[in-house]
Structure formats: structure tokens, C-alpha cells
């Protein structure tokens, strides 16, 4: 027996996933959608066509919409589904995904229901976080279907006039809250500080802030894949580079067969509206990640946004110093000119990378040294601005030391 899941972009039905008894699946665009003048592909890896896409093409895009690691395992345990069954999981939690995508079983189509289900107080948040090891935050209500990729605990909520709500089935979430990680302390402050420094040096960063409840310090980020039109919150389509390049989430690291900088820069060159601008932005991003010691800057942590007929880099997100935690790997998620051991990276690797991504070595040198100088200054500035928080001081000092160390390596680069 074939099971069908309906796929929407915002509130527009665009196609369906069909799953056979052997778990083989195919994705088919609706003919009515293909006939629209404003039809656009669900993914660069799934171009508009009448013919169905087979499992090998379908699986990477949809699998990358789902949470990973222990969060995924917990959701599957709570819901009674196999951890390997992506489509069963999407059927349960696919109602509000990254970008404009919503997924519903064929017997539960999107309904035009704008009601807000439930107000969420700070006490509610504290209770949710206290129980997150038993009840995943993405399943805080059995009637709400929320999916966010990644391995961190997250709470997607709708925020209106400084109040949080659980969104209804059709209402998009507007913000994401991240609590601290029990295994890696101060992750909230780490990410907040690194993102503020990134913003200070000119990287495109969403609106972020720290949010305090009585018991928890939370990292709050405004979703860049949402926009208000005519008083209604609308979904904006996006996809990460694993989706666009047709890699499974298990391949997000280059060492595991995933994409590297060369493949990502080539995609930007061939498909983006303003490739020169976005390649420069990504170049600054990769230098910045080296400076702060972010070894987890993989292809799922960079996204493409589709807005008003343009294709461009989405704002950057999930930027933090993984070197802050000595127990984490020091191997970079993507190689810098063939080298992924952060303490071994030198000018020759940056130069080789510049050749791979077709950027002049002189420009690579100029950008690397400019970003290094700016990052050191920005780190000092943001440290002063956040010094009123006592708990921030030790976090800032450690990350600033990492920045200084890596900036000194870049300062010695000579072409």
C-alpha cells in the first residue's frame, strides 16, 4: 500500500511524496503547480519537471529537514517510530520546517486556521526545559508539528508583542529559543558572543538576543526565513547546502563524503543571482570560523534563501567556538586547502583553498588579514559591552584568547 505525504511551500500545495511498501519513495510536483507562472523548485537538487524523482534524489532533501542525534532518537522513542524512518518522522513533525516547507499526511491537509493554540509563559519554558530529556522540545504539544534540523535542543515559537505562543498547525513560528546544553556548559553565551562579534565585523547575522526566565538563560534568534506581509507572517523558502547538493545529513562533514568549499563555491558561481557578492561573504565567514575555532562549520550550517526571484546566501547562523570545549574534535568540518586540523592550518592551505575556489591568492590574503584585525577589535568591543554579565567574562576571555592565537597565525601570512 502506498502512503502519501503532501508537500507545501508556505500555503501553496506543490507536490507529494509517495512511499511504497519497500520504503522506496518518489516526489512528484503537482501539475497545477508546474503550470503556475511563479512556480519555483523545492530545491536546486529537485528542478521543476513532470517526471517523478526517485528515492536517491528525494531522500537527501527531506532527511535534512529533520533533527539529528539524541534529539531525533528521543522523538522517535516518544512517538514509537523507527529512528531510521525519515518519512514516518516527517509525517509526525513536518508541519513547520525550515524555510517554507510544510508536510502533511494526505488525510490531514493544511487547514486555514489562524488561531494561536497556547500562550507560553516563562514558567512554561522552564518546565519544558526541565523535562527535555524525557519530552523533546520539538514535541511540546501532541497537536503541534514542528521540525528543525540539527543536533541542538530548540523551541520554535510564535512571538507577538513580547509574548510567546505555540503556533497553530498553519501558523509559522517566528523565533527559535535554545537552552543551554547539559554536556557543554555556556553554549548559549558562547554562541551569543560569537554571533555578536560576527555581526560587528559585517557578516549577515539574524536578530539575536539573550532571554532570561526565572531558571534559564536562553539564546533567542529571530527566524530569517519568515516575513510579515499584509499583517500575516509568511514563510520564506530556504535550503541548506546539503539539500541543494543532494547530500544526506550523515554526510555533512567533508571527511564523511560531504561537500567541501570547492563544491559550495562552484554552486554559488553557477546558480546565485549575485555570485561575486555571496562568494566574498562566504570567504569572510570561513576566515571568521577559523579565527574563533568553529570546527563544526559544515554544509548544513550554511543555507540558500529564495526571495523575490533571487537566489542568495541566507544570513549566517550556528556560529560558536567549538575549541572552547577541549573534548570536541579540533578537525574542521570542511578542509582548508586539504587540511582540516585547525592547529596545522597555515598560509599554504589558505592559498591552495583560494585556487580551489577560484579566488586570487592576493585577495585571500587581503581578506584573511582584514577579517583577523577586525575580529580582534570586535571581540574586545563586544566583551566590554557584555561585561555586565558576570557569567560572560570567563567565556569571553577564553574565546578571545583563541581569536588572538589564530589572528597571530594569519598576521604572519605572506604571499
Image (tube, rainbow, N blue to C red):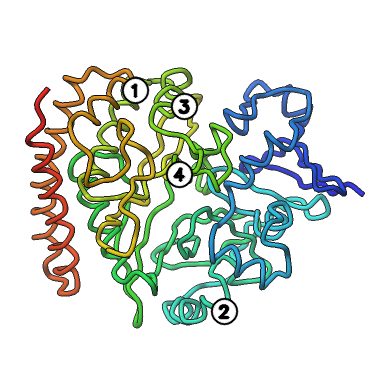
Classify 18 as above or below 359.
below
Q: Position of residue 242 (x, y in %)?
A: 52, 38
Tell me the residue that label 1 is attached to. 357
Marks 1 and 3, how far apart at CA: 19 Å
Where is mark 4, residue-wise?
253
State yes or no: discs 4 and 1 in contact (Cβ < 8 Å).
no
Residue 263 point in image, percent of width and height:
44, 27
Nearest the eye: 138 or 237: 138
Q: Secondary structure at mark 4?
A: loop
| Residue located at (16% from left, 19% from top) | 362
| Residue 383 placement: quadrant | bottom left
Left or right, residue 112 beside residue 266: right
Earlier along the polypeptide chain: callout 2 or callout 1? 2
Residue 290 against residue 132 in the figure, above or below: above
Q: Residue furthest right?
A: 1
Looking at marks 4 and 1 on the same chain, the residue that comes earlier in the sequence is marked by 4
Classify 213 as above or below 103.
below
Q: Position of residue 226 (x, y in %)?
A: 48, 46
Q: Is residue 364 left or right of residue 143?
A: left
Q: Which residue is mark 2?
A: 134
C-alpha distance separating marks 2 and 4: 29 Å
Closer to the camera, 324 or 92?
324
Q: Earlier in the sequence, mark 2 or mark 4?
A: 2
Q: Secondary structure at mark 1?
A: loop
Does dot 3 land on a helix, a strand or a loop? strand
Q: Mark 1 vs mark 3: give the one in front.
A: 1
Give the labeled residue for mark 3: 311
In this view, the residue in front, 162 or 373, is: 373
Q: Nearer the viewer, mark 3 or mark 4?
A: 4
Pointer 2 or 3: first along the chain: 2
Amino acid at each position: 500500500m502506498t502512503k502519501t505525504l503532501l508537500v507545501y511551500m508556505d500555503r501553496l500545495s506543490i507536490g507529494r511524496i509517495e512511499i511504497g511498501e519497500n520504503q522506496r519513495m518518489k516526489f512528484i510536483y503537482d501539475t497545477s503547480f508546474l503550470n503556475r507562472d511563479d512556480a519555483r523548485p523545492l530545491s536546486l537538487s529537485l528542478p521543476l519537471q513532470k517526471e517523478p524523482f526517485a528515492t536517491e534524489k528525494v531522500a537527501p532533501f527531506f532527511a535534512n529537514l529533520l533533527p539529528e542525534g539524541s534529539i531525533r532518537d528521543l522523538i522517535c522513542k516518544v512517538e514509537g517510530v523507527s529512528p531510521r524512518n525519515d518519512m514516518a518522522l516527517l509525517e509526525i513533525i513536518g508541519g513547520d520546517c525550515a524555510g517554507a516547507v510544510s508536510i502533511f499526511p494526505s488525510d490531514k491537509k493544511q487547514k486555514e486556521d489562524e488561531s494561536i493554540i497556547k500562550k507560553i509563559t516563562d514558567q512554561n519554558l522552564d518546565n519544558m526545559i526541565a523535562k527535555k530529556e524525557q519530552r523533546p522540545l520539538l514535541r511540546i504539544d501532541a497537536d503541534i508539528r514542528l521540525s528543525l534540523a540539527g543536533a541542538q535542543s530548540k523551541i520554535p515559537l510564535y512571538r507577538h508583542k513580547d509574548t510567546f505562543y505555540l503556533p497553530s498547525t498553519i501558523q509559522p513560528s517566528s523565533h527559535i529559543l535554545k537552552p543551554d546544553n547539559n554536556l557543554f556548559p555556556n553554549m548559549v553565551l558562547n554562541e551569543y558572543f560569537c554571533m555578536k562579534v560576527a555581526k560587528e565585523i559585517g557578516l549577515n547575522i539574524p536578530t539575536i538576543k539573550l532571554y532570561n526566565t526565572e531558571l534559564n538563560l536562553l539564546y533567542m534568534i529571530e527566524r530569517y526565513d519568515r516575513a510579515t506581509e499584509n499583517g500575516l507572517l509568511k514563510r520564506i523558502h530556504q535550503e541548506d547546502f546539503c539539500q541543494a547538493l543532494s547530500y544526506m545529513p550523515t554526510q555533512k562533514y567533508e571527511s564523511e563524503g560531504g561537500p567541501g568549499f570547492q563544491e559550495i563555491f562552484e554552486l554559488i558561481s553557477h546558480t546565485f543571482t549575485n555570485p561575486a557578492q555571496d562568494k566574498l561573504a562566504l570567504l569572510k565567514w570561513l576566515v571568521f570560523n577559523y579565527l574563533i575555532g568553529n570546527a563544526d562549520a559544515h554544509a548544513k550550517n550554511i543555507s540558500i534563501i529564495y526571495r523575490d526571484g533571487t537566489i542568495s546566501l541566507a544570513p549566517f547562523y550556528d556560529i560558536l567556538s567549538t575549541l572552547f570545549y577541549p573534548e570536541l574534535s579540533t578537525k574542521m568540518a570542511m578542509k582548508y586547502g586539504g587540511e582540516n586540523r585547525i592547529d596545522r592550518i597555515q598560509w599554504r592551505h589558505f592559498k591552495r583553498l583560494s585556487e580551489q575556489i577560484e579566488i586570487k591568492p592576493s585577495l585571500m590574503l587581503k581578506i584573511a588579514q582584514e577579517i583577523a584585525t577586525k575580529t580582534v577589535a570586535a571581540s574586545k568591543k563586544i566583551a566590554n559591552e557584555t561585561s555586565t554579565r558576570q557569567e560572560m567574562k570567563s567565556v569571553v576571555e577564553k574565546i578571545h584568547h583563541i581569536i588572538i592565537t589564530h589572528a597571530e597565525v594569519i598576521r604572519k601570512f605572506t604571499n
